[in-house]
Amino acid sequence: MSVATPLEQLALTFTGRLLQPADAGYDDARRVHNGLIDKRPALIARCHGTADVVDAVKLARTLNLEIAVRGGGHNVGGRGTIDSGLMIDLAPMKGIHVSPTGRTARAQGGVLWKEFNRETQLHGLATTGGVVGTTGIAGLTLGGGLGWLMPKYGLALDNLKSVEVVMADGSVRRASADENADLFWAIRGGGGNFGIVTSFKYTLHSVGPMIAGGLVAHPFPNGKDVLRFFRDTCESLPDEMMMVAGLMTAPDGSGNKLVGLVAAHAVSLAAGEAALKPIKTFGPPVLDAMGPISYCAQNSLLDASIPRGALNYWKAHFVKDLSDDCIGAILDAFAKCPSPMSQIVIEHFHGAASRVPVADTACAMRVTGYNVVIVSQWTDAKDTERGIAWARDSYTALGPYLGTTRYVNYLGTDEAGDPAAVAYGPNYARLRELKKTYDPENVFHVNVNIKP
């Protein structure tokens, strides 16, 4: 009588799907959002619940397979998948429960922000989460979580009340401010370094369903004036309003480069329309799509510009300040952009997200200032070398203006030095000690890794 293999034993109770390279559905399941990533796991565990995740972790340990964890699959570095290891895929885990009276929502690790917002907005509630609706809640929250509500309500991780975590030994822990508090501190910014978070409980706020937001766009030759206006406006923004600038190519096929301003005032529709008026009248813009908009539509406004399957290579860094010289360097870089799909995005950080003391969470991104994201994007593999070169050259040109802060979720896999040390700054030493406590063998290392 033959003895069942560990995989055969798991298959008897696993409620999701276990996919090997020859199985139908494997090729689609292995792909992440970034089409530049082309990895082939030995096994994909498409989990339906926490018990599936526990058993997948135990199987990986038994078979000595490296583990990658896929939530929404948006991580541009492709950290949600792995060659020859076990991909633990949370995508089927879509449960969302909203408590309108308690103003909380619990959601599983495979939920996307557009799915989360759809449920919470039935009750006129929301939490900070994502400027692209197809992003997963898991990776975005664990690495920080910027979104349209962050000046008023903080980062996504600032709105976490509790989490359920599968640890490296397969045990399950709940973490909150009063239970496993060290673990709760660490996962709020520490990414997937400490375990696999299978569910998140968030605080919700009264938002929408209609807010004031949207975008305006100006001709690229006016870029210096537009970005100066953006800088000057951001210096006095209220907590209720977030604003982002973007250099892009017109979607009409003309090839014309544009400078766009995207804003959201997510508290009072009347106050928001008044706050947006100076933005709408400056220039004036050649495109004005700013005004009353549903909160769900605001959160999906940029989805089409970051399509699934496009080939991506990003570089990002906070700048010391958005000086005239820095603006000039950004404009010069975009003038050389080889692909109409590529962008340079300037995200402004202020308000509640910036006022949290650095030591309160693992996330050290508690600054007021500007994060510049060079989004190089194309569809034809023959353009890969050129697309990567443009992003790297643009990043190098910004070198004199770069500050000391970096956003974990934007870090690539080819960063120089120890990017975790830079991103976590004064919190890095404590994170390494906690890594030694919760994952001493560094089982969860396919991430912006914190070595124990």
Image (tube, rainbow, N blue to C red):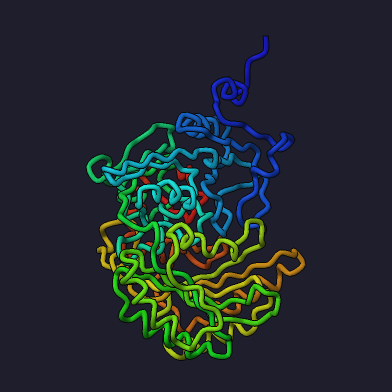
**Total numbered labels placed on residues in the image:** 0
Residue at screen point 36% across, 62% down: 149
Q: Is residue 391 visible?
A: yes
Quarter of the figure with the N terminus: top right
Q: Can residue 428 be seen in this view?
A: no
Q: Position of residue 106 (x, y in %)?
A: 37, 41
- Camera-side residue: 323 or 266? 266
Q: Where is residue 194 in the image (x, y as percent from the top left)?
A: 40, 45
* Vertical arrangement, residue 107 with respect to residue 234, above or below: above
Residue at the limit of the structure toward the top, as seen here: 1
Residue at the limit of the structure toward the left, as seen here: 178
- Camera-side residue: 451 or 228? 228
* Vertical arrangement, residue 17 with respect to residue 336, above or below: above
Q: In which quarter of the image is residue 351?
A: bottom left
Residue at screen point 62% across, 32% down: 18
Q: Position of residue 431 (x, y in %)?
A: 35, 53
Residue at screen point 41% across, 37% down: 167
Residue at screen point 45% across, 38% down: 95
Q: In which quarter of the image is residue 422?
A: bottom left
* Vertical arrangement, residue 200 with respect to residue 127, above or below: above
Q: In which quarter of the image is residue 374?
A: bottom right
Q: In this view, does 307 lie to the left or right of 415?
A: right
Q: Position of residue 429 (x, y in %)?
A: 33, 57
